Image: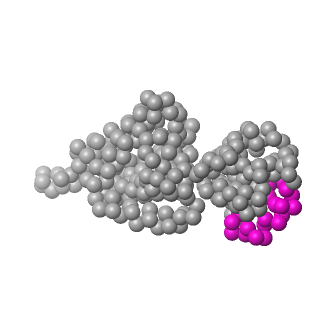
Amino acid sequence: MTGDAAGLHRFDWRLFGRRTLAVLAGAVFIYAGVLKVRDPLQFADDINNYQMIPWSVGVRLAFYLPWLEVLCGLALVFHRLLAGALAITIALMLVFIGATIWAKAHGIDVACGCFGTASSNLTLTWHLVLDGGILAALIFLWMTRER
Amino acid sequence: MLLGLAFLPAIGQAIYYRGAVSWQQPPADSAPVSLAQAKGWGGAVLWIDARPEEQFASGHVPKALLLNEDNWNSLLPLVLAAWSPERKLVVYCSRQSCDASHAVAERLRQEAGLKNVYVLQGGWEEWQKGGQ
């Protein structure tokens, strides 16, 4: 076997790491999306609690955003439409984090609704740690994506 | 493409939920009553469950009567039989954002001519949180 041939069979740990991270991030979005798809009225309440947008807009977002999360999650898991999925999920995370900080700054006690009722007992700090970790992973995937 | 694709299931789900959601404004809080306040009324309360029959069957406030718009004509006589002028009617549906309790409360006022009709804030979800 030549050196070149050996190189072809060398395991690419960096690629494996990126793919694994993408699958994990995708799974998180699928999980979060499915929880909210199952109960859009609760999510509408959660959005309304932030007092940032009118109810008529929030209730429509409550039907749209969970499906967007699920589709982006699937795209990350199956490595399809990756750039678009990463751009959307990064934007979503920035909005979620920004809204959480905004609500806290205005003294609004909100359940973020990020993971449906499963996240209702998380403290603000843990919300930010969790969201920040996901955002960091997504940004890493964006910076290192194959072009 | 993902942004567009997400519209398809979202629209389908919105159509499925169209009758259960208040689209233009949060469910009205006309004559709202908190769980603590309603419980404080004790035996004077006549609980009215405005959810579909299958949800009522899976769990409801003790002694609550079922009254929803689907079976209005057949269920209303049971409510009227249990009603008396000194009683307070507290109507609830699944949660804060559902509309059924408001619709039933309005019909009880307008069509049945009943007074002292209230809507439970937070609905059945709030009752369950209350540990009852």
Which sits in the foreground, A90 or B99?
Answer: B99
Instruction: Tell me if residue B55 comes above or below residue A12 in the rendering.
Output: below
The image quadrant where one finds the N terminus of chain B is bottom left
Q: Residue at x 34, y 48 (%)?
A: A89
Quarter that holds the C terminus of chain B: top right
Residue B54 is at least partly visible in this image? no
Q: Is residue A89 magenta?
A: no
Relative height, residue A145 to residue B130 (above, below): below
Q: Position of residue A30 (x, y in %)?
A: 44, 54
Q: Where is residue A68 in the image (x, y as percent from the top left)?
A: 39, 56
Residue A106: in sight, yes or no? yes
Q: Which stretch is magenta?
A: B60-83
Percent position (x, y) of residue B57? 75, 61
Q: What kind of colouring is applied to the model shown?
A: one colour
In percent of the image, x 28 and y 41: which residue is there? A140
Q: Position of residue B22 (x, y in %)?
A: 55, 57
Q: How many marks?
A: 0
At horizontal 47% and vertical 40% (from top left) the residue drawn is A51
